[in-house]
Amino acid sequence: MFEWMAWTLPVAVFFCCIVLMLAGMTVWELRSPTTLRKGWLPMATTRGDRLFVGLLMAAYVNLAFVGLSEKMTAWFSLEQEPSVWISFVVSMALLALVMRKG
């Protein structure tokens, strides 16, 4: 069923993090309902809204990294393509920033 997808360790960790975040956000919402808040995003958002926007941004960062990794090898004169763990860390940091300040 999932033969089309490259289930590598970074992909599995990324999806496990998403599942854990959704479960944690569900528990947090049940214990403490959210209110609208205005951060640097151009709209008032709830925690769930910020999680959704942050997950979209994280996905775009990972896709851009995968798409540009071959070119980065040439740009920076690397011997091999950079590790996808770099994009994972950057995307999770971006997600944390959106959740905190967005």
Image (cartoon, rainbow, N blue to C red):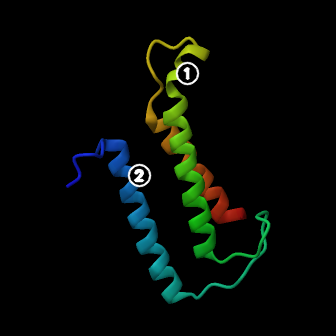
Where does the image place residue 54, in percent across and percent down from the top left?
60, 60
Q: Is residue 35 above or below residue 55?
A: below
Q: Is residue 22 above or below residue 33?
A: above
Q: Is residue 27 above or below residue 77?
A: below
- Proximity of marks 1 and 2: CB atoms separated by less than 8 Å: no
Q: Amino acid at mark 2?
A: Phe
Where does the image place residue 95, in percent across and percent down from the top left?
59, 56
Mark nearer the N terminus (1 vs 2): 2
Q: Nearer the viewer, residue 75 or 36?
A: 75
Quadrant including the C terminus: bottom right
User: Would residue 98 be found to the left or right of residue 25 on screen?
Assistant: right
Residue in the image at 56% along x and 14% along y: 74
Q: Secondary structure at mark 2?
A: helix
Q: Secondary structure at mark 1?
A: helix
- Answer whether residue 92 is visible to the viewer in this image: no
Residue in the image at 75% along x and 77% along y: 37
Q: Which residue is mark 1?
A: 71
Q: Amino acid at mark 1?
A: Lys
Quadrant including the N terminus: bottom left
Q: Nearer the viewer, residue 24 or 38?
A: 38
Where does the image place residue 36, in percent across and percent down from the top left?
72, 82
Q: Which mark is residue 2?
A: none
Residue in the image at 45% along x and 38% along y: 85
Q: Nearer the viewer, residue 56 or 79?
A: 56
Q: Residues within 10 Å of mark 2 (few under 14, many from 20)?
A: some
User: Would residue 7 be found to the left or right of residue 33 on screen?
Assistant: left
Q: Quadrant of residue 32?
A: bottom right
Q: How many marks?
A: 2
Residue in the image at 59% along x and 50% along y: 93
Where does the image place residue 77, in percent across and percent down from the top left?
56, 11
Q: Which mark is residue 14?
A: 2
